[in-house]
Amino acid sequence: SGRGRGSAAWKGVRRVFGLRRRERGGKMGPPGNGTPRARALVRKLWNLRLQSVRRRSTATPSSNQNAQPRSGGVGPVLSSAITCGGFSLLSDTMVQGMELHSAKRLEHEKAYDPVRATRMFGFGFLFYGPLQHFWYALLDRRFHRRSYFPHFASKVALNQVVLGPIVVMSVFTWNLVLQRKAHQLGEKVKKDYLASVVNGWKFWIPAASANFWLIPLQKQVFFMSACSIVWTGYLSYASNLATDNKKAERSNRAGSKA
């Protein structure tokens, strides 16, 4: 009845437009028989559909690749270097400002040291910023599941066990070598290295946990560089502590002799 009339009408449409069923699946295939004009129209529509499907299938991988941050290229590395260098300069300037305030209160003579601030900027720009860029990209490739606890815990642990000690040793070496006091490195390491690493764990474990859990890879260097305002200030203070103490001893000796 109604179903038979609908089936007959559908057969008529198929006959006019030249559609035929595939042998499997019961879906419409490309145009077959029919009037030339109808076949040309259906063939055109069919080709447009195939092109649309191909565009969607090829666009998905490229969009995923663009969403993934790349560790290579000069632009991202330079951006990380400038960010870290700027924050390192700001951190050392703030620490020197606090030191100057304390020196004035204690009536000690002390002046702002632009060379020291430049050293810390160079450390962040030339070493620490690029190192963070490639380090976080490596961790993200190896442990890419952010909300998966074993991956998250592995990144936090490696950040403290591998990166932390390297950075502390590097900043001690950087400052002493540029001050032409490399012979004091052994004594400096024995006196302050372990304490600096342990203090770094107290600060960086919470910071790294927030970084790896909440912050996307593209912004991790910025976030950790912002956190490093506190840590770089501490390293700058610790790496220059021995030099300042020796200067104070010399001034005291000179005053006692006078």
Image (spheres, rainbow, N blue to C red):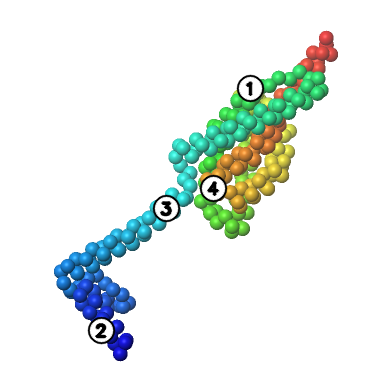
Q: Nearer the viewer, mark 4 or mark 2?
A: 2
Residue bearing mark 2: 8
- For the image shown, how many numbered marks are present on the structure? 4
Q: Which mark is residue 114?
A: 1
Label 2: how many Cα within 10 Å (few below 14, some 14–19, many 20+): few
Quadrant where the N terminus sits is bottom left
Residue 226 is situated, as x and y percent measured from the top left of the image, at 62, 39
- For mark 4, what is the residue? 217
What separation in Å lies between label 1 and label 2 (alpha carbons)?
91 Å
Earlier along the polypeptide chain: callout 4 or callout 1? 1
Cα–Cα span, label 3 and label 1: 46 Å
- Tell me: 79 left or right of 21: right
Instruction: Name the residue: 83% across, 9% down.
Output: 258
Calculate the distance from the C-alpha at mark 3 to the C-alpha at mark 2. 46 Å
Foreground residue among 160 and 94: 94
| Residue 63 tag number | 3
For residue 211, above or below residue 193: below
Residue 209 placed where, x, y %?
64, 50
Along the polypeptide, which appears first: circle 1 or circle 2?
A: 2
Task: Estimate the spatial distance between the alpha carbons at disc 4 and disc 2, rounded to whole Å.
Answer: 60 Å
